[in-house]
Amino acid sequence: MRVTIKTLAKALNLSTATVSKALNDSYEISNDTKQRVKALARELHYVPDLNASSLRSGRSKTIAVIIPEVADSFFSQAINGIESVAQEKGYHVLFYLTHESLAKEQAILQDFQSGRVDGVLISVTAETHNAAHIKALESKKIPVVFFDRICDEMETAKIITDDYESGYKATQHLIDCGCRQIALLSISENLSISNQRMEGYKKALADNQLPFNAANIIYCANDESYNFCLIKNLMVQANRPDGIIATVEKLSGSIYFVCRELHLQIPTQVKVIGFSNLQSAWLLNPPLTTITQPAFNMGKAAAVALFKALNKKNYSPKNEILVIPSSLEIRNSTVI
Amino acid sequence: MRVTIKTLAKALNLSTATVSKALNDSYEISNDTKQRVKALARELHYVPDLNASSLRSGRSKTIAVIIPEVADSFFSQAINGIESVAQEKGYHVLFYLTHESLAKEQAILQDFQSGRVDGVLISVTAETHNAAHIKALESKKIPVVFFDRICDEMETAKIITDDYESGYKATQHLIDCGCRQIALLSISENLSISNQRMEGYKKALADNQLPFNAANIIYCANDESYNFCLIKNLMVQANRPDGIIATVEKLSGSIYFVCRELHLQIPTQVKVIGFSNLQSAWLLNPPLTTITQPAFNMGKAAAVALFKALNKKNYSPKNEILVIPSSLEIRNSTVI
DNA sequence: ATTTATTACGAAAACGTTTACGTAAATAAA
DNA sequence: TTTATTTACGTAAACGTTTTCGTAATAAAT
C-alpha cells in the first residue's frame, strides 16, 4: 500500500490538515507534533505526491529552459549554471530544444498553459521576430526571463553579455592586426545579439574610417553544408576579406574547413575571430582568437532572476537588463 | 476566468465526463459530439490541466534524463536523439546532471518517488558501483533504460556501443602505427564502459605479444588540473608511453595540453587516440584520431526502448542489450 | 414479442494534496 | 473578572481531471 498523508494522519491520530502543515513547517503546528510527523514520514519513506500538491497549490516546482541547441558550448555551460541554482532551490528543470524553429518554440510555449511549469528561461530562435507567443504566458502569471538572445519588446528581466562592445572589440582587434576588408558572419536579421554585434562592428569600422560594405555581412542558416558554400563563395572572390568574424560558435568551424579546402593560411592570408566558448579553442590549428562569453554566469544569473520573481507575490520579474561582459582572448588565428 | 472542462460542459450542456471522453477520443462518444467539443475547446483555447490529469491518471507525460555532464559532445548529441523522439511522442524531458557524483544521482532518483516522471533514461556516474537506488524505482513501476554507461545487475533495456571492440581497435591501431608502450586513460574502476574498453585494450596487447603493464592504466578524476598533473607525471618518465588512449572525451584535451607544455610532438613522439564526438576533432592541432560513438542514435534508441516500455501494461522494459557500433576515424594524431 | 447488444451519455467518486475557516483551550490584557 | 489574543489543531471544501458504474434509448437477435 502506498503511504500518503492519510496513512500518517491515521497512525498518529491527527488530521490530514495537521500532517500537511507539519510537513510544510507551518507556524500553526507545535514543534513536538512536527517532530513526530516528520519522524514517521521518514520511517515509512513517505514522499509527497507532486501532482496532487501542484494541483492544489498551483505550483509545480519546475522550470523550463528553452534553447536553440545543446551542441553549442555556450548553451552547455549556461545549462550548468541554470542547473546549479535550480538544484539548490529544489526545483526541477525541463529542457526544450527549438533547433532555431519558431514554430517549435511556439508549440512548446503553448503547452505551458497546462500548468506544467512555474517559470521559463528562454533564449529565442533566430526566426523569432516578435514576442506574441511569449507574452501569452503573462495571462497564466508565468514569469519569463531571457538570457543571451532576448526580445526587446518584452518587459522582464534579461541577462545578456555586452554584444555591442564585443562586436566593436572584435572588429577593432582585426583592424589593429592590419585587416581592411572584414566580413561578419551572422545568423539572423531579427536576433538581438546579431544586431548588437553588427552595430559594434559598424561603429568600429567608422571609427577607423573604413567603409561599410553590405556584401561583407553574410547571413548563415541552420544548415552546415549551406553555410560552407556561402563562406566558400565569399572566400573565392578576388577581393576576398582579410578578416572574418564568426558571431556564433558553429560558424568558426565552417571557416576553418573552408580555409583548409581553399588552402588559405590562417592568420597570414585571412584572420579569424569567433564568438565561442569551446575549451578546445586553444587546441585548434591555429588556436582560435575568441570572444568568450560568461556562459555559466549568465545561466546562473538568469536562474537567480527567475527565482526572485517566483518568490514575489506579484509574479512579474523586474524589467531590467543585466549585462555580464565578454572577453577577447587573443590567439594565433589573428596574430602570428 | 479559467476555461476548464466544466466550462465546456456547461456551454455544451454536457457532463464533464462526456467532455473528457470526447477530448480523449473515447469510443463511448459519438463523432458528432466529439467534433462539437473539440471545436469549442479550440475556440476557447482550452488547455487541459496537466497536474489534475496526472493526479487522476497516474501518468505525467514526462521522462527524466540523467547524465554526468552536458559539456561533453557525446551527451550533447545523445540529448538531441532523446529529445527528438520525446517531442514526437508528446512527452516532456526533465534533465539532471550528476557531475559524476553518486550522492547526487541518489538524491535525484529518490525524488522520482513523487510521481514526477513516467520513465527514466540514465547514464550512471563514474562512482556508481551498484544499482540499489535505481532498483528502488521498480516499486513505483517506473521503467528505466540505460544508455552508454550501464549497470550490469539491472535487468532492463540497455543501449551501448561496442566498447570492448572499440578498445581493441584503438589499441590495435596504435600498435599498427608502431607503438609498443601504450597508456590507457580511464575514469573509473566500476564503470561498464571503462572496463570493457580496458578489456579490449588488454586483449589487443596479448594478441600482439605485448606485455600488460598496470602502470600504464591511469585513473583520472573529475578535476581537470589534477588530471593534467597525472598525465604530465606519466609523460615525464624516462620510459614514457609512445601511445595514449583517452577513453573519455575531455581527457583528449588534457593530453594535448600536456604535450604542448612538454614540447612533445604528436604524432612523432607520442600518438594519441581519443573516444570523442567533437566535430572539432578535424580542426585540432594535429587533427585527432578518434573512436566516434553513435551518440545521436544511442539516445534515440534509448528513448524508443523507454517508450516501448511505457506502452506496455507490464511496465518493465525487455531485458536486452542493444549494441550500436562505434567507428575508428584515423587522423593525424596517429599517422603523419 | 421478448431478450440481448450496442451506443451515447451522466452521476459521482476518486486521485492526494493544500487551505480557508472554525473552535476549544490556554494565556494575556483590560 | 471579563475580554481579547494566541496556540494548536480539526472539518471540509477545493484543485481539474479520469474512470467506474449505471442507464436510458435504439438496434439486433431470437
Image: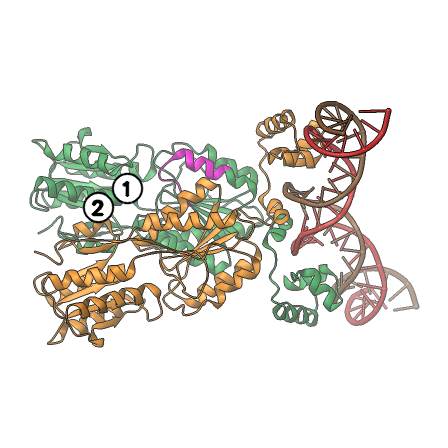
Chain colours: A green, B orange, C red, D brown
Assign the magenta stretch its main secondary structure: helix
Discs 1 and 2 carry the same chain letter: yes
Helix, strand or loop for disc 1: helix
Say which mark, if any, is on residue A274: 2
Q: Secondary structure at mark 2?
A: strand
**Is residue B32 toward the left or the right of residue A100 in the image?**
right
Q: Within the magenta stretch, is there residue B29?
A: no
Chain where mark 1 sits: A
Which residue type carries mark 2? Gly
For the residues marked 1 and 2, what is the alpha-carbon distance in whole angstroms?
15 Å
Q: Is residue B314 above or below residue A192?
A: below
B133 to A155, vertically: above or below: below
Q: Chain of mark 2?
A: A
Q: Earlier along the polypeptide chain: callout 1 or callout 2?
A: 1
Please tell me which residue lies in front, B189 or B107.
B189
Three-letter code for the amino acid on which mark 1 is drawn: Tyr
Q: Is residue B260 visible?
A: no
Question: Would you place residue B39 above or below residue A222 in this image?
Answer: above
Q: Nearer the viewer, mark 1 or mark 2?
A: 2
Q: Residues within 10 Å of mark 2 (few under 14, many from 20)?
A: many
Q: Position of residue D18 (x, y in %)?
A: 63, 43
The picture places residue A89, in percent across and down from the top left corner, at 50, 59
In this figure, which residue is indicated by the disc labeled 1? A164
Measuring 30% from the left and 48% from the top, which residue is drawn there? Answer: A72
Q: Say which of A36 and B172 sits in front.
A: B172
- Residue A164 x, y percent position in the rendering: 28, 42
Residue A148 circle label: none
Tell whether A98 sits left or right of B90: left
Residues rendered magenta in the picture = A96-110
Q: Quadrant of residue B198?
A: bottom left
